[in-house]
Amino acid sequence: MEYRFKRVVVKVGSNVLTRTDGSLDIARMVEIVSQIAALRDAGIEVLLVSSGAVASGRGVLHVSEALDDVSQRQLYSAVGQAKLINRYYDFFSSYGIVCGQVLTTKESLQLEDHYQNQRNCMTVMLEHGVIPVINENDTVSVTELMFTDNDELSGLVATMMHAQCLLLLSNVDGLYSGDPGSRDSRIIREVMAGDDVTGYVGKSKSTYGRGGMSAKCGIAGRTASEGIEVIIANGKRENIILSVLSDGYREVPCTRFLP
Ligand code: GLU
C-alpha cells in the first residue's frame, strides 16, 4: 500500500482503548499495534500518543468515593500506565519492534531547554528504530498545569517533531454537521484553513478521557496551520489507520483538516 506521509503521530484516545465497563480493550490494542507495524514495514516513522492510563488503572483498583480527584488520577495512572506500556511492549515485540515510554508534562514542552531535550529524546528513539509511546505523566502533573488532554499533547508533539500528519483516533467517525446520532447530520470530510467549524461542534465530552470534539477541532485547526494534515477518525473501525494514511481515506468516514 502507498502511504501519503513519511512521519506521522498517531493519537489513541481512552475511549478507543477501553470497553464500556472501563477495562482495557486488548483486542483493540493488538489491532492498533498491527497497523503501526505495517506502517513501519512500509518505512513510515510513527510516534504513538496513547491515553488510557487512568482508564486502565480504574479497571484494576476500586477505591473509596471519598478519595479526591487528584489522588485518584495519580493512583490510577501510576498503576494503569504500567499496565498499558507492558502490553504495548509485548505486542510490538511480537512484530520484532521495540517501543519505549515517554512520559511528559506541559512544562517539558514549554521551557526552551526542556523542549529541546524532549525533541532530542524522541529523535534519538526514532533514529534507533524505537517507537515512542507518549503520554502525559499524570502521576506528577499539577492540575492547573496539565495539558487540556492528549489531543493537545499530540498536536505539540506533531509540531515539535515535524510530522506530516497527526491522526486523532477517537470513538466517533469525525466532525458532523449536527448531532452525530441524528439522521440529518452528515460528516464534514474536509476543513480548510480558516474555516469556522464552531457551529458544528457538540458540547459532549469524552466518557473515559478528558477531551471532546470542541477541543479536538481547536487543536486540529492550530496544528494544520503549522503545515500538518490532521485527521479525526474512529479508532474502533477495522484498518482505519492504514486507510486514512493512504488513498483509502476517500472510502472511510473521517474529517481531514488540511494545512
Ligand atoms: N493522560 C490520560 C491517560 O492516559 C488521558 C488524557 C486524555 O483523556 O486525553 O489516562
Image (tube, rainbow, N blue to C red):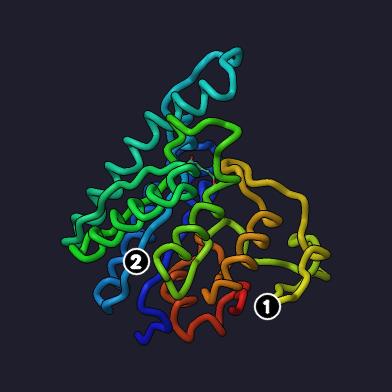
Question: Residue placed at 37% from the left, 43% from the top?
Answer: 103
Query: 189 or 24, which is in the foreground?
Result: 189
Q: Which residue is mark 2?
A: 46
* Neighbours of disc 2 within 10 Å: few (<14), some (14-19), many (20+): many
Tag nearer the camera, 2 or 1:
1
Query: 189 or 100, which is in the foreground?
Result: 100
Q: Which mark is residue 193?
A: 1
Q: Quadrant of the C terminus?
A: bottom right
Q: Vertically, is 191 above or below 234?
A: below
Q: Residue 105: where, in percent of width, then height?
A: 45, 41
Distance of mark 2 from mark 1, alpha carbons?
Answer: 25 Å
Quarter holding residue 190: bottom right
Instruction: Tell me which amino acid carries mark 1.
Output: Ala
Mark count = 2
Q: Residue 1: where, in percent of width, then height?
A: 35, 85
Q: Secondary structure at mark 1?
A: loop
Q: Name which of mark 2 and mark 1 comes first in the sequence.
A: 2
Q: Vertically, is 245 above or below 232?
A: below
Question: Is 49 displayed left or right of 198 in the figure?
Answer: left
Question: Residue placed at 26% from the left, 64% from the top?
Answer: 126
Question: Residue placed at 47% from the left, 55% from the top?
Answer: 12
